[in-house]
Image (cartoon, helix red, strand yellow):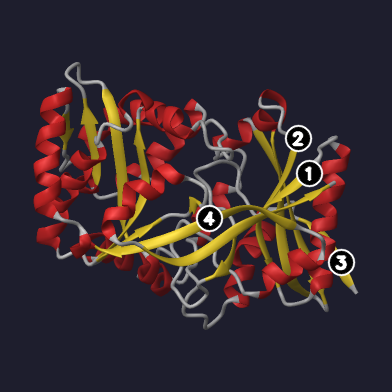
Amino acid sequence: MIALKKITTEKEMKQFVTFPFSLYKNNKYWVPPIIKDEVANFNPKKNPVFENAEAQFFVAIKDGKIVGRIVAIINWFEVEKQQIKKMRFGWFDVIDDIEVTKILLEKVKEIGLKNNLEYIEGPVGFNNLDKTGVLVDGFNHIGTMITWYNHPYYKEHLEQLGFVKEKEYLENKFKFKNVDAVYFNRISKIIQKRFELTPLDFTKTKDILPYVDEMFKVFDKSYSKLSTYVPISDAQIAFFKKKYISFINPEYIKFVVDKNNKLVAFAIVMPSFSEALQKAKGKLFPFGLFHLLSARKNAKDVTFYLIGVDPAHQNKGVTAIIFDQYTKTFTPLGIENCIRTPELEDNEAIKKLWENFKPETHKRRRTYRKNI
């Protein structure tokens, strides 16, 4: 007998967040979140994403133990302003029992029906800054702090229940040594001169903060054409700024401005925190923070988190300026591997951006869809 329980208290939310710790115990590829941060992320009083979205949290219980979890999400901006009648689900984890998956997804369908939505898609988060997709290939590669890891049977469960592939994402990596520093330095100088552009490098977080709002305007313009895009509100930008910017190495954030000091391109790269998060085991104290700070300073792998170019400056080689700046930053640090976040398989522009670096597709993930 499988029972479904809706999460209503903070204690239950902590159980919801920690369920994967048992599901992936001793799995050397799964990267745990920081429990306290994850609980706060799901708190409508703390996360402004709930201004435009609502979520219901459920766990499946069998023999007195949690055996599955899911978040049923409605992004009201998407539904009402974009007229996309989508019922989302995310933070989906289950034991290898299709009946558990079935009862969780039936609840998502029920909520979708009540709200006159047309189809279910997942796993996805609230918006484009959240994790996305079920891993379908590359299970023997360590995860990242900005992707979900899952067992191979998740895909089988969804397909057996009539879900079909909606979007495919590729995760690529390349050796930093594949980046031709001489080439990018030469091209960067040409592009800067031709279009009167200037790169900005930083050593202090406080110098970055005045540009963050403008960065998200560029993000909005450059990502809005993607089929998955949902706008990020000013409150969410402020939340992101407070939560993440101060923890990212300032020298890993690159901006490009025009002659009027207007931002036209940006990139955010983070040190790989995967192994540090595994050592932290979900807790910042007593030793978790030490592991994260050590990774921030010493990690030899980096993750390209966001990169965007204002459409008015696209196809002008502006990214060469950014890559030139990164070669100057990363070379003395001995960076070895560059890991990219999931990118839509049909995004030809992004493929061209990276093709010179001989990228290797090491993971694939996808979202699944089913009509309600």
State the mark number for residue 85.
2
Do labels 4 and 3 touch, CB within 8 Å?
Answer: no
Amino acid under disc 4? Tyr
Give the residue at x 75% y 69%. Answer: 157
Label 3, label 2: how many angstroms apart (C-alpha)? 28 Å
| Nearest to N terminus: mark 1 or mark 3 | 3
The mark closer to the camera, 3 or 2, is 2
Q: Which residue is mark 3?
A: 3
**Which residue is labeled 1 in the image?**
119
Q: Secondary structure at mark 2?
A: loop
Q: Position of residue 246 (x, y in %)?
A: 31, 44
Q: Disc 1 versus disc 3: distance between alpha carbons?
A: 25 Å
The type of residue carrying mark 3 is Ala
Q: Secondary structure at mark 1?
A: strand
Does residue 350 sit above or below 25 in this rendering? Answer: above
Q: Which mark is on residue 1?
A: none
Picture quadrant of residue 74 = top right
Please name the residue that numbered disc 4 is placed on.
169
Instruction: Give the class, few, some or many, for how many residues have Cα within 10 Å of label 4's Cα (few <14, many ≥20).
Output: many
At horizontal 52% and vertical 80% (from top left) the residue drawn is: 27
Mark 4 or mark 2, which has the lower sequence index? 2
Q: Nearer the viewer, mark 1 or mark 3?
A: 1
State how far apart marks 4 and 2 are (Cα): 22 Å
Foreground tag (4 vs 3) = 4
